[in-house]
Image (spheres, grey):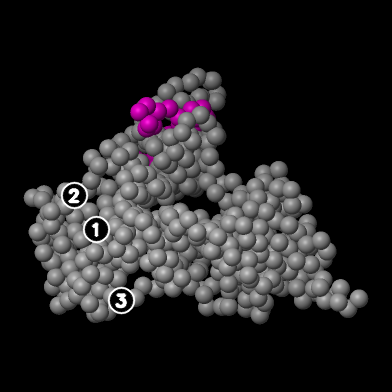
Amino acid sequence: MLDANLTQQLKTYLANLREPVELVASLGDDEKSRQTRELLEEIAALHEDVSANFDGTDDRKPSFVIRRASDAEKWVRFAGLPMGHEFTSLVLALLWAGGHPPKVDADLLEQVRGLEGDFNFEMYFSLSCHNCPDVVQALTLMALENPRVTATLIEGGTYQDEVDARDVMTVPATFLNGEPFYNGKMELAEILAKVDTGADAKAAEKLAAKDPFEVLVVGGGPAGAASAIYTARKGFRTGIAAERFGGQLHDTLGIENLPGTAYTEGPKLAGDLERHVGEYDIDLMNLARAVKLVPAKEEGGLHTVELGNGASLKTRSLILATGARWRNLGVPGEAEYRNKGVAYCPHCDGPLFKGKRIAVIGGGNSGVEAAIDLAKIVGHVTLIEYDEKLRADEVLQRKLRSMSNVEIVTSGQTTEVTGKGGKVDGLMLKDRKSGDTRRIELEGVFVQIGLVPNTEWLQGSGLELTRFGEIATDEEGRTNLPGIFGAGDVTDVPYKQIVVAMGEGSKAGLSAFDYLIRTEPAEEIAQAA
């Protein structure tokens, strides 16, 4: 199961074990069970403190439990093979079960250990999902730290009948005590915020106690990270308030147009940025959702950003880098069937539609790339573009047109997503030239039609927005309000690209530096008077 490279890597990692680890498998007589036995035997052979036995009695076959030999009440179960993106999750489960300390904030660990109540998690993942490992690893850690938490992590491709029966049409999909809990990526702190009723109040109290910043960056994507790095290097007290550090990078797979980096992936780049931010004295506040901006009353005064948990942060200069999100179709049925056939991440959810008929809506680069990737998995793809022609790069169009199971529709307007029994079963399509309508029968709709800036929370603040809702900025990233700057996809700067966002973030950071050195704090002016 493991090639020579993975075998050597795993052997190196297992040298960090401090206590014996047991692997207990429940197997059938199928090929996946044979592969599971082979994998566990290979792992056990790499270290004397790892043992494998095959007398498990769980109904899911194949599956296996990882547990510490000295504390069998704490365990995590993998159902199916955790390979692909999940191999790292398997390695971490082995290390944590073996007593190797996790690299997690001590406060979060204590919060996990102090959870009261019984939490039985089941979570479905796909091997190609780049958002799933964060959820798998968070639930694994919780289960191995608290005996009242269990986690069963299920590879959807192995348990397709179960996936269909529970109407799982997007991953990661998490259930708690048998009921749907959350669809989508969640980190440990986010899970705790949902299950620990006192988490918000604790977080708000901690944030409210912070002194005013000299620079506060709202948003943790490429633009926000670049801004903070630049201002921190100038010696200013800098903070980042991010609803999700990394932003849309977590929803981006292959990145091939970042100069100097031939290829990387979004989650990896997000991790690289977080590590870079960590090299400086930057106060990173994750899960901090901004809900209101109260600008300073006078130049040099303190701007206030109110957060969803009730806390407020104050700062002399403010950089807004809240990014953008996927645009919705805005047609009947879209919201009703979200995660029930309507999806936005082809890399995560594509494997769940193996052999089925799907549509991709959007003829730009994102839409055409999604259609190309999905055509390798699904039975048939209908690509629908509103304009008279596709807008994607020509090289992508040629690739798409070469695929035999793809139909391309231009001048097509999706007017409704239809469904039956709680699942998508088709869509209504209008020909914008002839006015004719037709129904396309299918089982999935992937929406790839551009971005919407995250600026709703800025309404009524006095900040100038364009008619598209973007923050209006000048050539130096300044807004119409002194001491407030904008950067990245949330602004009116053209070309929503990672490299552009990084450059705009750096520029906003330099502009904030220039503002601070030229502006005396309002409090000092008042005291001097």
State the residue position of label 1.
Answer: 77
Q: Is residue 463 above or below residue 74?
A: above
Give the quarter of the image for residue 214.
bottom right
Name the residue rendered at 51%, 55% in the picture.
Answer: 248
Task: Pick the residue in front: 183 or 206.
Answer: 206
Q: Which residue is found at the position 82% from the left and 71% from the top?
A: 522
The numbered mark, 3 or 2, whose residue comes first in the sequence reads: 2
Of pointers 3 and 1, the one earlier in the residue sequence: 1
| SS state under label 2 | loop
The quadrant of the rendering that contains the N terminus is bottom left
Please state which amino acid type lies under the numbered disc 2: Arg
Residue type of the residue flagged with mark 1: Arg
Question: Tag 1, which secondary structure?
Answer: strand
> Is residue 411 highlighted in magenta?
yes
Local crowd at mark 1 within 10 Å, few (<14), some, or many (≥20)? many
Q: Position of residue 328 (x, y in %)?
A: 53, 39
Q: Residue 71: x, y in percent?
A: 23, 69
Residue designated by label 3: 100
Q: Are marks 2 and 1 in contact (CB under 8 Å)?
A: yes
CA distance for labels 3 and 1:
19 Å
| Residue 217 in view | yes
> Which residues fall within the magenta stretch?
399-426
Q: Amino acid at mark 3?
A: His
Q: Earlier in the sequence, mark 2 or mark 1?
A: 2
How far apart are the alpha carbons under marks 3 and 2? 28 Å
Label 3 crowd (10 A; few <14 / some 14-19 / many >=20)? some
Name the foreground residue: 141 vs 61: 141
Relative to residue 52, is residue 317 drawn left or right? right
From the image, tell me which residue sits under label 2.
60
